[in-house]
Image (cartoon, rainbow, N blue to C red):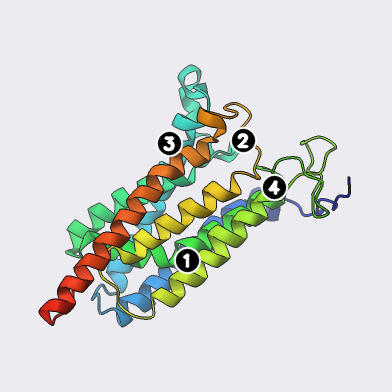
Amino acid sequence: MAAMPFPDVSPVAFSVGPVTVHWYGLAYLVGFLGAWYLLGRLDRSWGMGLGVDARLEILLASVIGVVVGARLGYVLVYSDGAWLEDPLYILRTWEGGMSFHGGLAGILVAALVESRRLGVPFLRLCDAGAVGAPIGLLLGRLANFVNGELWGRVTSAPWGVVFPGAGPEPRHPSQLYEAGLEGLALLAVMLVMSRRRRPDGMMVGTMMTLYAVFRIAAEFFREPDPQLGFLLGGATMGQLLSAPLLVVGAWLVVRAVRHGRAATARGGRD
């Protein structure tokens, strides 16, 4: 089989004395900062009236929500019960293991708390956060590729990659597929849609729907987690978790469209 060589890029971005910074950690950092920057722009263009202090509070809450939720999501769903024998495993984030769906649940909880504290409608705050979310998804998947993890299934395609630790056979670089779909494509849609104010729930609903579609499609090229394998009907855990996300996202879009039409009929804005 033809294959592309795995790029010789260290997972470590740089080291300063005893401190080692990995590309994966930088992906989280830049992703949060990028989303916070876009929140500032939307705060002004959408007239949300948050201000700098409120946006900083939202950023901090988002970091806590994503990190805690992503780690707990991975531990509870993907770790095959390792935490039951070793509860401290939950805290060892440096060993890897973060779940998007868990991170999404965590940031939604954070958004609920902040919406009540700041007096901002929950779905409106979620809409603003959804615009910048694909930045973290893009950079996170690129970091997965650099780390040589979450590789794809065996392929004869000329762009197949032989990943270290995955055997001698070329595999789909499914991390790059996800970076392109869940990252670049989704970010482009969110930025275009954010140019004008949409009914509450439209942006986050669209993000959820498209992410679920892209994730389900990409999972057909991604090797399932070895500790779980294929599940119901040959589906992967990523596909099973994305199915309800697709339903909720589509419902939010339909709800937003109906509210928008009702507001137009009243001659006002939703």
Q: How far apart are the two marked residues, 3 and 2, measured between alpha carbons?
A: 19 Å
- Mark sitting earlier along the chain (3/2): 3
Q: Which residue is mark 2?
A: 224
The amino acid sitting under disc 2 is Pro
* Residue 142 occupies quadrant: bottom right
Q: Residue at x 16, y 64 (%)?
A: 119
Q: How far apart are the two marked residues, 4 and 2, measured between alpha carbons?
A: 17 Å
Q: Which residue is mark 3?
A: 72
Q: Which residue is mark 4?
A: 147
Which label number is shown at residue 49?
none
- Mark sitting earlier along the chain (3/1): 1
Q: How far apart are the two marked residues, 2 and 1, measured between alpha carbons?
A: 31 Å
Q: Nearer the viewer, mark 2 or mark 1?
A: 2
User: What secondary structure is marked by label 1?
Assistant: helix
Which label number is shown at residue 33?
1
Where's residue 160, x and y in %? Answer: 79, 50
Crowdedness near tag 1: few (<14), some (14–19) or many (≥20) residues, C-alpha within 10 Å: some
User: What secondary structure is marked by label 3?
Assistant: helix
- Mark sitting earlier along the chain (2/1): 1
Do the residues under discs 3 and 1 have CB atoms within 8 angstroms? no
- Mark sitting earlier along the chain (4/2): 4
- Mark sitting earlier along the chain (4/1): 1
Which residue is at the front of the view, 239 or 19? 239
